[in-house]
Amino acid sequence: MDLSIDHVTKVFPSVRALDDVTFQVRAGEIHALMGENGAGKSTLIKIVTGVYTPDSGRLLLDGVPAEFASPREALAAAIGAVHQERNLIPRFSVGENILLEHLPTRNGMVNYTEVHRQARGFLDLLDRAIDTRAEVATLSVAQMQIVEIAKALSLKAKLLLLDEPTASISGHEAAALFAVLRRLRAQGVAIVFVSHKLEEVLSLCDRVTVLRDGKIAAADDPIASVTRGRLVSLMIGRDERVADIGVRNASLNRTVLELKKVSTSFGHRDIDLSLRKGEILGLYGLVGAGRTELARSILGFGSINAGEIRVEGQAAHIGSMHQALERYRIGYVSEDRKGEGLLLAYPVRDNIAITIWRRIAGILGLIAPGAEAKAATPFVGRLAIRAPSIGAMVSTLSGGNQQKVSIAKWLAAQTDILIVDEPTVGIDVKTKVEIHELIAGIARDGVSVLLITSDMAEMVTLADRILVLHGFRIVGEVTNSHRYDSTSAAVMNLIHAVEPATVGA
Amino acid sequence: MRRIINAEWAGLLAAIVVGAIVLAGVSPNFLSEFNFYVLLRSVCVSIVVAFAQMVTLAVGQMNLSVGALGGMVAVLFGGMMEVLGVPLWLAVPLAIGIGVAGGLVNGLLAAGTGINGFIVTLATASAFTGVNLGLTKSVPFYKMPAALQDFGNGRIGALPFLLIAPLIVSPLLALLLFRLPIGRRLLAVGGNSQAAALSGISPGNAIVFAHCLSGLLAAIGAILAVAQLGSAQPLIGSDWLLLSFAAPIIGGTALTGGYVSIIGAILAVLVIALIQNGLVLAKVDPYWVQFLLGALIVATIFFNRWRARPIRLG
Amino acid sequence: MTDQVLDSPRRRPFVLGQQAGLVVVLVLLGALFTSKSPGFLSSFNLFVLGRSLAIDIVIGFSQMVVLATGGMNLSVGSIGVCVVMMGGYLMQTAGLPVPVACTLALVLGGTLGWLNGFTIARSGVNSFIVTLASANLFSGAMLILTKATPLNALPRSVAAFGQMRIGGGWVSPMLVVAAAIGVALIIFYRFSVIGRQSLATGANQRAAEMSGVPVGRRIIAAHALSGVLAGVAGLLTVARVGAAMPAVGGQDWLLPSFLGPVLGGAALAGGFVSVGGTMLGAALVTTIRSGLLVMGIGNFWLDLFLGLFLLAAVLLQRYRGALSLRFRVQGS
């Protein structure tokens, strides 16, 4: 099936999500859709899948105009999608989830034997190990994403849209997915592939369309005609600016955080880690390696079964985030910005000041009117947070600005140690650079940073040293040469040495 | 056998068995045919009421008007027969229809306006009670048809006729929720309404359906209660609310939706009835019932904790 | 996510605010009822209304402080009656001076609430279930211990307080108590660190926790406070009735405890409360109740009107909420 997006415009109350967007996806091709977050990709997908309707413009399927009033109608038109967020029913089985849109019935009742038989078929294309009778709630994040992909495949769609399908999977599963997509392409399915991973796009896709700020930056360009650099410049509107991180040398400073032979209830064993003052220590690993869990163990979630943690040389027993902050001056920028990093329904001002309410309070624990604004305003400027006012609700801000607010509160708290977890996932390239400079800047000022990221380029830009985590164990340490090729090779070698079959994306 | 042991309601079953043994030891009357009859009679209405709440919990909603709707249906049922002379065979379907209509109001308001079902049913509960009291001025309808009274009092050995209702309703409900697509859609919406919507299921429809079903079950409960009491009392339903939540929850139904346990709810009702029965037989202060009900919920909480699955992060 | 209007706790244009609407309706209703029955605005009637209102307001506060942290308290009535009977026992049987008895009874209320909060915070179990259990436990224990016997030989001063009329005969001191608590709560939620942290806990517990807020402690504190407030409502009832009755509270308080806060604009999911709104909401309910009685519509149909009115009010809120949301976004 051919899909034609014809001058589609979609406007929301505070933003023009799509502005006169036109491009074509042909049957039998894998068409990449790229753009920073907020560029309009997810909105476009939601229009094609019937969640939204365009304000102007139209969709054409095989040349025929199509209007969808609901997802059900899009499904009926043989359009399937894997969205960015997980959309599974937790207490239903894998099989039932895969076939949810079209459960096979016999005599009016659901035919479970058939459900599991068919589901098994689709699942085997990607991962034989998942049991179709297992409850989805018991699966890992990677497994859930695979189930979602199997679900989309079961629709036998003629048009398939995938929004960041490899966000949580890597290695074999990603390779299996690409094999399936290539096979579908050969069968004449039209595939729209949204991904931030440039390497994937370059190796898998036939043509690419780039969105920027809701408008087309490039449409239907054959993949052969673009390079990584060109793609990036199309997405941000100018060439990729490398962060100016300045010069730092923390190698002779004292150790502020130390983990000695730590084992945790999450499954870590024998973790040795030492973080020096003003240093940026990277913690690299593939999805599922246990990095976030390690960070949370330090902050008092889960329990430490063996070994010890020392802060500034003293043995530390951190029981909660509250303790981590108040007593040990440790902060944490969560990878889950919307769920854990921010109070979306509250203003920017409150979100920044939340960590310092106690400090700005006067007698009787009361905060004077205006004290909050006074404390929070400097950080709006320092981080270049773009918001209508300091009283604006955080939910109305763009992803990049939201992340800045989420970081700002830790700057306000003036922590000595800051654990930063995936700081620029889903952030536009321009803001990404600003955040990198920010992190480098606070390290220069003496804050010790433990940086967790899956973005190798980011790691190479920022980290002084890189600890490599795999399977909840430290498999090695790499001193960062700040040159992408040598450092990434060194890191990957460490991972290969432990598990040769797993190739990082 | 293994499936029974691992089932979530295994604990409840064990509690019933143990409780029965203890009671048999404490009082010889426990094992009498008459006592079993009394025991079984007391659970008929409760099981249906528990189901009425369970189906709204399934879709991720709450129905605070379960008791009020039941009371209103009960007096309208009794009133239409005594005052309007409507024959029994017509009054029953009419009463059920009123229950469904009440549920429809709840469902349409909750789904159509986006107002939280909690508040909607809080309001309609008040409204239904108002209709109930307004029509009856708190005076029951006493002249119920003989056939109804016979049904309410009749039995075969220890098995009351009233038991027919839960015996028919339970498997039908199980069929609906576990084998029919419409029931699966209901649970899907309760499990993750956004995901369900993206899969082409209409959350609004599921919510309306669930509330209608709840109203229907509440109406059945009301009719049974009238049969059991032999009169249509405005007080019917006034003590249903807490029980309607307690039984499904103790039985393992998820408060947030998406998962129900029919067997669990039935067993929970049985446990509660056993406690009440036991207290009467042992001549213990009836005030202990409430306390033990609370203790039972606490026990369920701890039992569930003990079986909790570990959660993995990404 | 909450389906209520997501407004900042301050900065709301008064014209479109919840409170304004309620005041308007109140005035209209007051005019309506007075025109049908002039006795409605008599000092005696207002005095009687004021007493009921005070109790409903405090019951509403008791639920509100828990709603603030994102939970709910189904044991408001049960704690209330436990405090009532404890207070009665201490005053009548133990012969303690009234202030001492009241204080100790309130301590019981706070302790019962603390138990709720502690269980919820430690076990992570939904507050609905925990307070469903504790409602039964507390009421049951109370019934077992008191054998449901009312205590009506309380010291004179208790009933006297209930009968007292100040402000020229219009106002009951109970209303002053309720208002004072209201003022304290406003200060608490707007200006105090603990209050702000409690609201943040309700808005998004995980995010609050990850920002260093001791959420466990805040939830426990909210429930303990709820228990104390339920106790205050109970003691006020004792003063009004002149006796400690085990029939007080229980499930009767469930509806009023939600009506006030919800009509007043509290978010059912937590994070936002309106003290003024809760008071106005309670006022609205009391006015309707009394007005209908005065108009001779009779006790029996009361609940129907109450229910219909609640629906209308909530519908109106939703409609107005949609309006104000659009207003704010265009202006920003």
Image (tube, coloured by chain):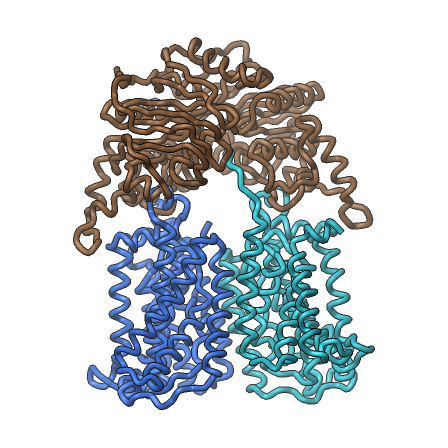
Q: Residue visible at 75% across and 80% down? A: B34
- What x and y, as percent, mark residue B221? 67, 72
Q: Quadrant of the C terminus of chain C?
A: top left
Q: Residue visible at 37% across and 43% down? A: A320
Q: Quadrant of residue A172?
A: top right
Q: Is residue A223 left or right of residue B264?
A: left
Residue C325 seen anywhere in this rendered image of the structure:
yes
Nearest the viewer among A159 and B77 is B77
Nearest the viewer among C44 and C237 is C237
Nearest the viewer among A372 and B313 is B313
Residue A387, relative to residue C75: is it above or below? above
Residue C234, relative to residue A425: is it above or below? below
Chain A color in figure: brown
Nearest the viewer among C180 and A15 is C180
Q: Residue visible at 73% across and 72% down? A: B93
Residue A400, relative to residue B15: is it above or below? above
Q: Is residue A490 left or right of residue C264?
A: right
- What x and y, as percent, mark residue C119? 45, 58
Chain letter corresponding to the colour cyan:
B
Q: Quadrant of residue A417?
A: top left
Total number of numbered discs in the rendering: 0
Residue lying at the far left of the rendered structure: A363
Chain letter corresponding to the colour blue:
C
Q: Quadrant of residue C239?
A: bottom left
- What x and y, as percent, mark residue A94? 66, 39
- What x and y, as percent, mark residue A149? 63, 31
Residue A392, relative to residue C220: is it above or below? above
Q: Residue visible at 53% across and 33% down? A: A84
